Image: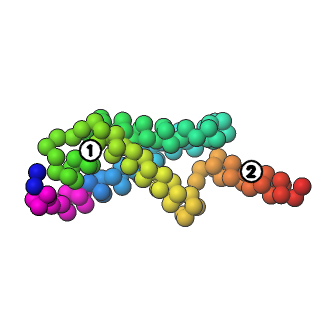
């Protein structure tokens, strides 16, 4: 392909990016049902599998609905599994950003997460006094 013929379809790119943001929020809220349970927070959260599960869920969503942002933005003729998995990773990363927005900026969190943070803060403060 002649590189001089390349151009971005800004309207399509905007639609794809908005879709990524919406899917990130939806994925984050869907996974929150599982990630914010006391069992997960107390037993599994320290094992760092949350990110792996989020990427797997994001990839699964993109594969099922054939959403490949890269192929759509770069105007390819068809979507690819690689693009769908990569898009799922972007969506999972975006969900981490939305978690940060809700928890750190807006101070929205489950009661189990609030209790865990309070407990950790007390442990840190208690450890510093000894």
Left or right of residue 3: residue 62: right
Number of residue marks: 2
* SS of the residue under disc 1: loop
Rendered location of residue 83, percent (x, y): 28, 42
| Disc ID at residue 100 | none
Query: Is the residue marked by circle 2 packed among few (<14), some (14-19), or many (20+) residues within 10 Å?
Result: few
| Disc ID at residue 68 | 1
Q: Quadrant of residue 118?
A: bottom right
Task: Report whether residue 38 is seen.
Answer: no
Q: Quadrant of residue 39?
A: top right
* SS of the residue under disc 2: helix
Rendered location of residue 43, percent (x, y): 66, 36
Q: Tell which tag, 2 or 1, sits nearer the viewer.
A: 1
Where is the C terminus found, in terms of image quarters? Answer: bottom right
Q: Earlier in the sequence, mark 2 or mark 1?
A: 1
For image coordinates 14% across by 57% down, the residue present is 3
Q: Main secondary structure of the magenta part?
A: helix
* Residue 70 falls inside the magenta stretch: no
- The stretch of residues the image draws in magenta is 3-15
Work out how far the residue at label 2 is from the one at label 1, CA to CA, in angstroms: 42 Å
Task: Report whether residue 14 is seen.
Answer: yes
Query: Is the residue marked by circle 1 packed among few (<14), some (14-19), or many (20+) residues within 10 Å?
Result: many
Q: Are marks 2 and 1 in contact (CB under 8 Å)?
A: no
Q: Quadrant of residue 62?
A: top left
For image coordinates 23% across by 58% down, the residue present is 13
Q: Residue furthest right?
A: 130
Residue receiving disc 2? 119
Rendered location of residue 111, percent (x, y): 63, 50
For image coordinates 47% across by 56% down, the residue present is 97
For image coordinates 43% across by 41% down, the residue present is 55
């Amino acid at each position: 392909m002649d590189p001089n013929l390349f151009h971005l379809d800004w309207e399509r790119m905007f639609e794809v990016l908005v879709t990524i943001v919406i899917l990130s929020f939806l994925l984050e809220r869907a996974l929150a049902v599982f990630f914010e349970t006391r069992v997960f927070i107390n037993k599994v959260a320290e094992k760092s599998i949350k990110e792996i599960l989020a990427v797997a869920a994001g990839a699964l969503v993109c594969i099922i609905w054939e959403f490949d942002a890269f192929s759509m933005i770069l105007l390819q003729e068809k979507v690819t599994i690689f693009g769908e998995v990569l898009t799922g990773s972007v969506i999972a990363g975006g969900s981490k950003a939305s978690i940060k927005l809700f928890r750190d900026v807006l101070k929205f969190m489950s009661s189990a997460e609030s209790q865990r943070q309070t407990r950790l803060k007390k442990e840190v403060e208690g450890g510093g006094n000894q």
